[in-house]
Image (spheres, grey):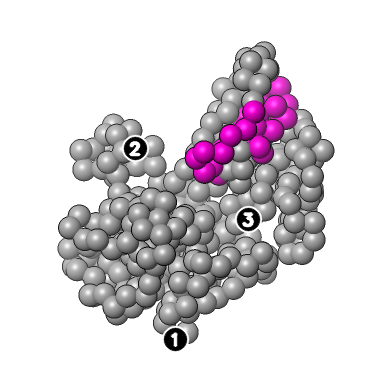
Amino acid sequence: MKALTVRPGKAGSAKIDDVAEPDPAEGAALVEMVAVGVCGTDRELAAGEYGEAPPGEDRLVLGHESLGRVLEAPDAGEIAAGDLVAGIVRRPDPVPCSSCAVGEWDMCRNGLYTEHGIKGLHGFARERWREEPDRLVRLDPGLGLLGVLIEPTSVVAKAWEQIERIGHRAHWEPRNVLVTGAGPIGLLAALLGVQRGLEVHVLDRAAEGLKPELVGALGATYHTGSVGGAEPDADVVVECTGAPQLVADVLTHNAPSGVVCLTGVSARGRITTLDLGGINRLMVLENDVVFGSVNANRRHYEAAAAALAATDPRWLERLLTRRVPLDDAVGVLAHQRPEDIKVVLSPPGR
């Protein structure tokens, strides 16, 4: 069968491979590929920036944003043949650490976790894959192809859960949120903000096109330019770009007792001048909190599934700007179109 693979650490090594059928040792449920979302992580893996193949192998199957249909599953389980499912990306470490031991593998403390399509486990960009049933999330069949959005939505569902936990350290009545970046993560973060009844502002570089339209369709406000010119006193800031200057700017543009969540991963080596003394003074005197959030556990996937089910499917459909057969995936990794929001890989020949 066909799969999209890379040699971790080697730029330009992405290719469509003929690979063996998934080993039953990978999981008791056999799933056929319906779709796989492509994101910046996949492009960084293809560029050789990081990644780890399974033990004893030199190539890694990519793909962590999965949507599949179950072909085989154990009898009398919660997952059955025909179910539409997504695979949970991260598996807990084998030790396990104190967090992994209680199902909080997204907060693994020793770094020994594995991740499908990223670290030590093959991903979902192959015609068929296996997983243990308790590592699958069953989706409402009415979502159809839109279910491929569950993994990025789980990331922002976790971010919002953490924001709310931190906010409730004291009396907290948030009114507004600033989201920086209108890529898939930013738009989904804005969606979850709107679902919480907040006044949502989104800042991005694109002055026209689909991004402003999608933000407007949510009932949110779209901005270009600077953080200070967008919403300088937001109770909540969700930074989704990883752009160093934007990260620096959001640290000084939020309301007193504000919460800033960083979800974008910055590239190393980019130097930005910071007034750390001024930032420290502001954070201390205003009781601000800045934290990072990545990955998700089962409850975040379940929250994501509920959020997607509650959203107008016509809005979600507009996020899926391009559908490409798996056979053409290498070109998708190499060349991102400016108008793309979410590119989705289909099974070969479809």
Q: Secondary structure at mark 1?
A: loop
Secondary structure under tag 3 reads loop
For this rendering, which residue is in front, 18 or 307?
18
Q: Residues within 10 Å of mark 1 (few under 14, many from 20)?
A: few
- Is residue 150 visible in this depiction of the protein? no
In front: 287, or 9? 9
Q: Earlier in the sequence, mark 2 or mark 1?
A: 2
Circle 1: residue type: Gly
Q: Which residue is mark 2?
A: 108
Place of residue 177 in the rendered image (x, y in percent of width and height, measured from the top left): 70, 39
Disc 3 marks which amino acid? Answer: Gly
User: What residue did someone put label 1 on?
Assistant: 349
Check residue 252 for magenta coloring.
yes
Disc 2 marks a residue whose amino acid type is Cys
| Disc with the residue nearer the chain's start (1 vs 3) | 3
User: Is the magenta region chiefly helix, strand or loop?
Assistant: loop
Q: Nearer the viewer, mark 2 or mark 3?
A: 3
Disc 2 vs disc 1: Cβ atoms closer than 8 Å? no
Q: Which residues are magenta?
A: 245-273
Q: Tell me whether circle 1 and circle 3 mark residues in contact (CB < 8 Å).
A: no
Horizontal and vertical percent position of residue 303: 50, 50
